[in-house]
Each structure stands twice: as structure tokens, then as C-alpha cells.
Amino acid sequence: MLVAASVMVNPASGEVYDINAVRMKSSAVAEEKEDTIDVLFLGNSESYRAFSPLQLYSERGITSYNLGASALRACDCREILGETLKKQSPKVVMLETDTLFEEGSPYRDPEANLTNKVESKLPLFHYHTFYKSYLPKSVKAKDMYYKDAGVFKGFLVETMVRPYEGGDYMSLDAPKAKIREQNGKTLKDIIKICEENDASLVLVSSPSATNWNKSKHAAVEKWLDKNSQSIEYIDLNQKNDELGIDWSKDTMDNGNHMNLEGSKKVMRYVGSYLSENFDLTDHRGDEKYSSWDENEKKAELYL
Amino acid sequence: MIRDFLEFLQSGIGISYAIWQYPVLFLPITLLVYSIVPQKFRRYVLLAASLLFFYFFSGVLIVFAFLAAAVCYIVGRRMEIISADKTIKRKERSLKKRKVLAAGIVFLIIVLVVLKYTDFIGLSIQGVSQFFHGSFQWKLLDFVVPVGISYFTLESVAYMTDVYRDDIKAEHDFVKLLLFITFFPKLMEGPISRYNEIADDLSAGNKIRSDNVAEGYQRILWGLFKKLVIADHLAPAVDILFQNNIMDGSLSIAAAVLFTLQEYMDFSGTIDIVIGSGMTFGIHMTENFRQPFFAKNASDFWHRWHITLGTFFRDYIFYPVTLSKPIMKFTKKVRDRFGKFVGNIAAPMLALFLVWLSNGLWHGPRWTYIFYGMYYFVLIELENIFEDSFLAFIAKLNLKESSMPVRVFRFVKLVFIVIIGEMFFRADNISIGIEMFRQIFTNFHIGVLASNLGYLGMDFWDYCTVAGGLFIVLAVSVLKEMGYPMRTRLTSCPIAVRFAFWYICIFAVILFGAYGNGYDAAGMIYAKF
């Protein structure tokens, strides 16, 4: 019975970690009109707190969507990307790198413990909350990934200020980091998906004083050197001065994530980078994208 | 490979009985090894499993379990020798035995106090010093406390006292004593067992019986349901509500109610796992809960909640104090002076005070726990004082004690008393507890709670799961209170019905348990005592 139930709940790709977050984000982005998104942001909470599609549209007219979710694994990013590309044809995909260091991708991972191995044989134990994806509309509408997604396009606004006071975190010694083998394989899958869909993949590390360090930076560079030297990598943690990040004001949780003010500085840089390096259309004034102008007015954040 | 496997076992068991390593690996492997060795070696299998279990949690601090067993052994044997010495007068023998008993109890209590309460005492003295503008500063010692020390210390005290009272014979077999102290199912959260209840069965090496294993695992499943499906879902909400930013009485009430439910489901669920585990070996441990929310009043509540702690305090503090010569003399004087009613109230007051002070302190080195003990001391005394008046009052209203209005009143009163007590128990300090209590009456807005339901770490399905789980537990509790023979009825059903029932239960725990992706295993609440 366990085997039968596992077969029933196992997602088709067999490698999803947080099935409920994947389904919620996928159904939120599916609400967007077909072929209207030019840039996708992938990753975990470091993504959805830093990259604001509404600001990118407001300043440069570039349409984008933030597919980030809390503690999202690389395999989940791949799944959401695959689902999104069924309706959208973005030119650029920006993957926030912190997801590459998330643990817990259970399948075919040589570092998996016995619990993970049991889960890989009987996925029911991993996906036992699959029913949570099925919600009444009134409840689904209140889900954090759903309720304001139509306006903010996956970005989560937080105005709270809790300062970071630890100094230059990128110069501190940090334990050696490496991209787990399974996450490396998933990253190769993402590269391949982007190539097949004519999208340029860019790896980006959003500013995080308590979560990012020079070891993780080195691990990303090392992986790219070994596996894919053509992929561009931007570490915004090395550009704090250029961005003008003020850690006493621009973080919501003592240095882990950006708050709204921090995200504005990040997006100014990212917007500038995208405009200079990719041929992306300014959709402002285009009747087809008038809803974006309305959203901008509704949000009142970037007027 | 064996080392990796043991480390893997430790990674789960070292947190909770409800992590799958315990019921699916550790317990069945122990059962298997126990069943295949010859009978005379089976107790060593239980002992080895228990010592390994202890080691998973506390490593080298296992030495304290050996120490407790050694003290019990030495004190018991010494008292036996004194009892057998007919060259000494009876009165003198009794006095000598009492001194040996006292030495053993004091020694173990000192060990417990030093490990658990030294920093608490030091910080309290620091607080008093600062209050009087002194300069005393306490440097934290942060002793690591071995698992279960609060439980096996009381069991050791009970053993030595029972030997002193000649209720049981002193044990000559050290292994039997050690096994009693460390028996792995009851190590972390009790029940606080008496030596004569389980020691013989533990050492007998009785054959494993399939009906015991079945019944034991059914009980474990029930415990997992209460812990994983209900208690662990409530854990994040309770944590959030008790953070120091409680701003509304509706949130205080929610915090109190949810913590009470979480604690009851967690503790009683773990006890189900414990008793079920013992049952698989044919060891029958004492029940620790008996539908506590069906109690008539606070006193009755404590005859149904953490029963073995209550009976320990009754047998080893309340009765010895109440029946001591000075107290009996005092009681007689009060009765003669102020009448029977006052005498009956005053007589047990000192004993009750000591019981509730001990209850509070036993839970740990925090003033909120002492406050909790004193809270029940005051309330139970008030109930004792006003019970007769209350009965006279309802008689005047032509109401019987068993009538619905009286039962509803008693229930509502009890629930309020219990949840407020639990609120203080869980609060970070007494000031926060008082502020939360005050806000219930001065700043209550149900809309605040309603608007915060989505921010308590529980989603729509979590609320549904908890509500459904509570309904099932309530239904089972009502049936048990009525004495309905659920097990007998179930075992008399056709086999297909029985299998369907148990498979539904297993899948309910698998599907609705708060484990894995998105959940951390909420450590057992009572394991930290």
C-alpha cells in the first residue's frame, strides 16, 4: 500500500523537494498572459526579497517575474522553470545562487542519509503533504505566494528594518563550501533548459551579510570554471559600495535578506545590467502591457 | 557501517521517540534480539538497549544512571543489614535505617540540584543582591544534565523509601536495579515507576507474545497520532504566540489554549508510545493520564494528569508530612481550637505547600515553574475551603451535582484554571505571564486573533488537521470515560474491518503528521525535565 500510494503522489519528474511551493508558484505565474515575461528570477527567499519585477518595469519597462520561494531547492527551481516555459519565452533567466547550497534534495544524492534513501524508495513520506496544494479558492487567494502575485509578480515586500552590524562579511574566513553533486547536476539541467528555450542564464548572488561568504562565492566560480565557463556570474556581495547598500537600513532581518529599500538598490543595478547586456524591449506605452502600468499605480512603491 | 548506522539511529532517537528511527528501527531490532537470545540473557538485551539509548542522549553522563543505581543498591542493602541486626533495639534500628535512607536521598537530591539548579540559585542570589544594590555576580556553570535525571532520581527515592518501609525487599541484584533505573521506554518522560510494579517483569525475560506486540504497537500508533498529527502542528503557533510581543488578550487566550493542547497531546502521546513500547515486551507500566479534562476540579485534575508524579508526591511527601507526629499534634490543636472544618483545611496545608513547591521545582529551574506550583496550591486550597459552600449553594438552587449546569460550570472553571496555569508555565517569565493574563481582561479584541491566524506558522490544512485530530481524541476520551470497551469491540470485528481500521490509522499518521519537508521534529516537551 505504501508503494502504491507513493506511485500516486510522486510528481512526474520524480525530483521535487517542496511540491506545494512548486505548485503554488507555478499556478501563480500561469495567471500571466502568454509570452509577456522577458526575464525570470529563480531562487529561494534571497531572490524574492531582492528582485522586484515591478521596479524593473517602472524604471526600464522590462517585464519579469520572480519565481522564488522560501528555502526552494535547485530541483524545485528547475521544476518551476519548466512549468513556466510552457507559456512564457523569456530572454534572460537569473538564478540566485543561494539555492545551490540548500541541502535536502533527496534523490540520487550520494550524501543522502538513510531517511532520504527511504524517502527515495517510498516517496509518500516525502510528499505526504501533497493534499496541501488543493485548496479552496478563497484560501488559495490568501497564500503568500499567490495573493499579491498579480501585482508584485512574485516579489514579497517587507519594509521592516533590522540592521546588520557585523562589518565586512566577505573578507571574513568561512568554512569551505561546495555545490552538492546533486545540485550541480540540477544546475546543468537548468542550463540545458535555458539553451533549449533560447534564454540566457545568469547566476546572481543577492546581498546577504549573514548567508553569503567568500567560500560560497569561490564554490560557484569553481563550478563554473569546471562545467560552464560561458555562464555569466554576478556576485552583488562584492558590489555593496557600488550598489550603495547600507546595512543599517537595507535589511529586514539583521543581514540575511534585503528589505524594500535594499531591493530598490539591488534592482537599480540589475536593471542597468540587463539593459546594457541584453536586447530587452521597453514595454511602457504598449497597450498589451497596460496592466503593468496599473499595477505600478496600485503598488505605489516606484512612482 | 555499524558506526554509521548507530550514528544514524542516534540522530533520530537523540531528539524524540516520535522520530521514525525509534518505532521502526530501534524498538523492533531490540525486540528481535530479545526474542532470539535464551531467556536468562534477555534482561541483558534490555539493559544493553537501555544503556545504548541513554548514551545516544547523554553520552558519558550515563555515569549518573550507574551512580543512582549504586546508591539505591548500597542504601537498600545497608538498611536490610540494619533490619536484620536483632542486637539493636527496634527503635534504634529504625533510627539507623532512617539515617541511611536520609543520606541516600539527600545525596541523590544534591546531585540533581547541583546539575540542574546551581545556575538558577546563583542567578537568583544575584538578583536579590542587585535589588539591594549589591555587587554579587554569578558566573554561569552551564552543567550538562543527563537525560531523565528528574525521573530516575524520584524512582530511586521511591525505591529506597519503599525498602525502608519494608514494602519491598532490598534488591541484591545490581543489574536488576540498573535495568529498572535505565529502562529505555520510560527514561525520558516517565511514567515514574515503582520498583515492585515492573522490576520483576523487566528481569524475568518473558517470551515475546504476538498479542502484546500488536497491542503495544497499536498504542504506539495512537501516541504518534497525538504527537505528530496534533501536538507538532501546534508547535510553531505556540512559539510565535509566546514571543515577547503579545499585544492583545485574544492572543493571550489563544497562546494559553494552544499550549495546553500541545502539551497534553505531546506528553500523553509520548506516554502512549512509552507504555506501548513496554507492552511489546510484556511490561505493564502505570498509566499517566486519565482523561484529565473530565475532572471535577483542580484537585481531581491532578489525579488524572501526570498521575505518577502526583502519586509520588502523595506517597513520599504528603502522607509522611501529614502523618508525622508534629503535624498531627498541630492538627489536633487547631481542631480543638477552631473546629473540624478549619482543622481539616489547616492540617494538610503544610504538606500541600511542600507538594506544590516540589511540583514546581521538579519541572525545572525557573520561577515560572515555582509560580505554577504555588498557583495550584492556592487554587486547590480555595477549592477545599469553598467546596461545601458551593454544594450548599447548588442545593439551594435545587440542582444536583451531576446536573448539566453544574457540570458545565465545573468544566468551564477547570478549563480556565488549567489554561491560565499553562500560560504561566510556558511564559518566558512571570512578568510576561502576568501581562498576558491582564490583557485578557483589559485588552481583548477577537478581531486581532482572527487577523493573525494566517501568521501563526499554520496553514489552512494544518488548522483542519488539528481540528480533526482533536475531535478524534475527544471522541476516544468520551468513550474511555464512559468505560466503553473499545479494544474488545475492535478485536471482535471481522479481520478485514480490523485491518482496514489500522491501515487507515497508519496512513492518517503518515499523511497528516507534521514531519519532514516544512516541519522540524518538535522535541518532546517533558523530556527536558
Image (cartoon, coloured by chain):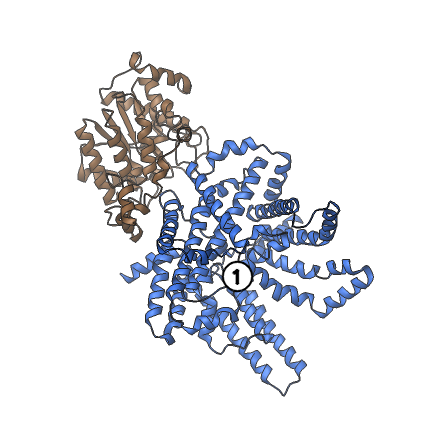
Residue drawn 61% across and 40% down?
B435
Closer to us: A141 or A47: A141
Q: Is residue B317 above or below residue A185?
A: below
Closer-to-camera residue (B410/B381): B410
Q: Residues within 10 Å of mark 1 (few under 14, many from 20)?
A: many
What residue is disc 1 on? B150
Give how far across and how far down residue B84 sits, in percent. 58, 84
From what the image shows, is residue B303 above or below residue B180? above
The answer, for residue B106, to whether it is visible in the render is yes
Residue A233, visible in the rendered structure: no
Res. B273 image quadrant: bottom left
Q: Quadrant of residue B220?
A: bottom left
Q: Position of residue B69 (x, y in %)?
A: 49, 71
* Chain given the colour blue: B
Residue type at numbered disc 1: Ser
Q: How many marks?
A: 1
For this rendering, which residue is in front, B205 or A33? Answer: B205
The image shows residue B262 at horizontal and vertical percentages of 50, 47
Please state if B69 lies on the left or on the right of B14 as rendered.
right
Residue at (59, 40) in percent of width and height = B436
Image quarter of the N terminus of chain B: bottom left
Chain at tag 1: B
Percent of width and height locating residue B105? 58, 69
In the rendered image of the structure, the colour used to display chain A is brown
Q: Nearer the viewer, residue B142 or B108?
A: B108
Residue at 79 percent across and 62 percent down: it is B334
SS of the residue under disc 1: helix
